[in-house]
Image: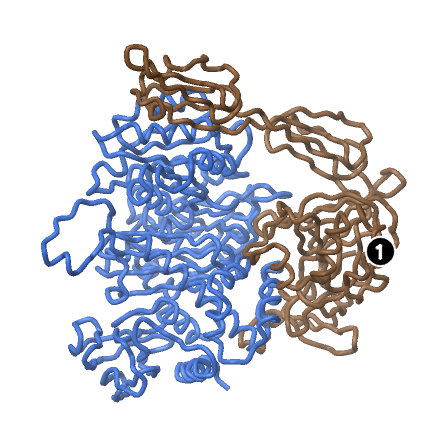
Amino acid sequence: MHKDPSRIKVVVATDCGSTTTKAILIECVDGVYRQTHRAEAPTTVEAPFADVTLGVTNAVTELQELSGRRLVNDDGTIVRRASPEATEGCDVYISTSSAGGGLQMMVAGVVKEMTAESAKRAALGAGAIVMDTIASNDRRRPHEQVQRIRELRPDMVLISGGTDGGDTKKVTELAELIAPAKPRPRFGGEYSLPIIFAGNRDARPAIERTFAGGGFDLKVVDNLRPTLEREHLGPARETIHDVFLEHVMAHAPGYDRLISWADAPIMPTPGAVGDILQAIAKGRGINVVGVDIGGATTDVFSVFDGSFNRTVSANLGMSYSISNVCAEAGMENVLRWVHLDMDERELRNRVKNKMIRPTTIPQTHEALVFEQAVSREALRLAYVQHKAFATELKGVQQQRTVGDAFSQQEGGRSLVSGMKLDLLVASGGVLSHAPRMEQTAAMLIDAFEPEGFTELAKDSIFMMPHLGVLATVHERAAMEVFERDCLVMLGTCIAPAGTAVAGKPVMRWSARWDGGSAEGTLMAQEMKLLRIGERAQVEVVPERGFDVGAGPGVAVKREVRGGSVGLILDGRGRALSVPGGAEGRRLVAAWAKALELHPD
Amino acid sequence: MAKAYTPGLTVSSRVRYRARRLLPLTGRITVKVGDLVAATDVVAQTDLEGDITPMKMSNLLSCAPRDVPSLLLKPVGSAIAKDEPIAQSKGIFGMMKVTVKATASGTIESASDSTGMVMIRGAAQPVQVRAFTSGRVIEVLGSEGAVVENDVALVQGIFGIGGEAYGPIAIACARPGERLEASSIRGEHAGCILVGGARMSIDAIRRAIELGVAAIVSGGIDDADLKALLGHDLGVAITGSEKVGITLVVTEGFGDIAMAARTHALLVSHAGHAASVNGATQIRAGVMRPEIVIPLADEATGDAHAGGGATAGELSIGTSVRVIRDPWFGALGTVAALPEQPAVLGSGSKARVLEVALADGQRVVVPRANVELIAE
């Protein structure tokens, strides 16, 4: 592996997804790192191929054909540059993987809201799908918990519980439930199920006794909640990554070869996305939310004031899970985003037909409008789940004054704030492949309800996983490619927070940009789109009771970024409320017209 | 480019079918290579370890956890019956002893001196795997299962619910476009695999359950009817474990849709023949579609093409396809043209398309993603 980042000029990166292996070529051009070519090929983990490297070789071969640069040896391996002058090969090859269902974990903790939640955060942050969280107070009786543990087939189990030096009994009890339940791993009978213990260090001997000789591979790491006031997820996350490589990947077909090809450890795809978003948030000093909506699941990532969180909404997606979105949100909530007349019974059948034939695409305008309405609800629900999870640590002792008794603020407040959010990044088919960028922006605004000033962008070819791994070997290259090639800037949304009353003004605004200017008053329930090019100077004066970031009624003057959409002024207030029936359809149609979502 | 590959479901009058029959964990294989088996014969069996019932004994006895092992009335490893005394406290000066009864039958598996927890392991649960199709055992997979092979007529559905079912094929709808109504189902259909035509109504399904029909195969089902049957809205298409008293297989999709004529004709041609049905559907990594397997009378001989599992085939001019998305959902036709360049759809998206000559003479442009092959 290259130790010196200055010698890394050509990078090949792949992301082995469940269905497609995506490869990109990154080159240093005139001193700046750019993504120059991309290619893809079907993933080959499943029979009859059963070797992930075949798909990697195919994708990189296509990359070779597109770039004209020799990247693949005759034996299918990836060519490395012999010298800095060589015009063949790459300096570094890196990869992520979510093939075969990614990393699936079960987590356990003593108290659901404290150690169990910290364990869940560690697992999700490492890129896992959390199949279930077992806790002493999860309202299930012990035999129900045992039954559930027996049903699951996780790749590994993470157990936490107890602060260092505290009670050892509860966490040992938890282990004593898990060990005899003998959860079976997903892969093969010969596989010893990895158990990671990251709880009270005093409980280690008892835990070691409990799992001894039961077909488990126990790994003991530092407590992820050494005190109630402190979360220490690093060692647990690193061990999850190690176990993912050593056990899970090693059992997946062809991964031993892939591991030997790669110059950096292969990461679970979502873990890599989380890493790059954290790097961006840190580098620019901003708060970021990223979303990746797929066919089966929706991942939401956030970095607020340096705190990273990730959630996976396992059954919120646009094909395999589309029926579940409609069931969870309720059809009336989906249809509030539709300005056309549609027959509900017919729509229900269409939803099920999409579920059983997930690869179909909307052909008609009506089908597209409906699918984008479903996506708004899938994203909204995923974000609700994320906000509920991304909280301050619960269980921390708080000192309250008499004044606090009136504010009645609970511990464990959500870290996610619509007003503090600076950048919202979208990825996933329905967002990335919307026929018009305006539609992507509108879906993001309707689902996430950003407040104040928020930049909107999309990762059009889902390059974030590649860049997440690249950041581990060459952070500057990853940042440069992220800014220049990964993100497609859509524009900025200005949304005053407050209660919008029909017929009343929300804010006065003025904007100047290269080649134009405009000003006006934004009324309640009004939306407005300004095509500002790359940047504009904006001044907004919110009405009393409305806030754009500086406080209620306080004016803000600043520069905003435009993009392929522009500047969107949203006068609908927060929280967003869309009436049903004819009035709702009229409003939604007016917003669609204002944002030019459906020309003609 | 005049070729493209697109998925399709197998509807075949003769295919070499291999049923890979696996236990959930290792066990005993009851057949050997070369054995001839019937569909309902057991080919492998094992015992799943019994349920665990934890008892917080230190709390129940009001003692320290370290005392629990010594207070058990039977040693670890002993059999115990439900309500049988399992532990007793020392009491005060030998008086006021507390006796705790076992909350489950089984074996005392462990007694922890650090948490005071006692575990009772229930009786092992036998698990048996049947052959699913009649045929010959061609492979034994270690101690995990066996592969049974036969030449069969095979119909893959698009969606199903319920597990494996067996019975002779009976025809309720003479035409593929005929709806399956309750009035078409009669007492003689009990234990049968009933072939419908177009949409199966909820009344028909309820009548079939009442009469003990093993399975229904029909063209479509209404989502509202499925919801009424299951008692909940199906969120994700992972099925097979439903316990509604019947197995259902839908060959085309949701809504009012006729069974493909060829599928219907194939099933009708096997009326009275023994068949096996599995409604289990999984539409995620490792796609699994429901199947109707009809072993052919003459035993497997010579070469036949491999079967089982979804197929992918080549799209070319003249290929028979079914449109699988609105506005022509369910329409059948043949490929009339395969333009190379992507086209802009009514939705505004750009996608690769094909032209389909529909059975009614219309010629329509459809995204390639929205057709499936009617596989031979």
Q: Where B105 sits versus A551, above or below?
A: above
Callout 1: helix, strand or loop? strand
From the viewer's side, name the closer residue of A65 and A230.
A230
Residue placed at 26% from the left, 62% from the top?
A: A417
Q: Quadrant of the N terminus of chain B?
A: bottom right
Residue placed at 78% from the left, 67% from the top?
A: B318
Q: Where A393 sits versus A445, above or below?
A: above
- Residue A448 percent across, percent down from the top left: 35, 66
Asked which quadrant contains residue A482, the reply is bottom left
- Is any part of residue A514 visible from this angle? yes
Residue placed at 34% from the left, 78% from the top?
A: A566
B75 on left or right of B372: left
A573 on left or right of B190: left
The residue carrying mark 1 is B171
From the viewer's side, name the closer residue of A302 and B241.
B241
For the residue marked with disc 1, what is the amino acid? Ile
Q: Where A431 sits versus A465, above or below?
A: below
B245 on left or right of B94: right
Chain coloured blue = A
- Residue B288 percent across, percent down from the top left: 64, 48
- Is any part of residue A95 visible from this angle? no
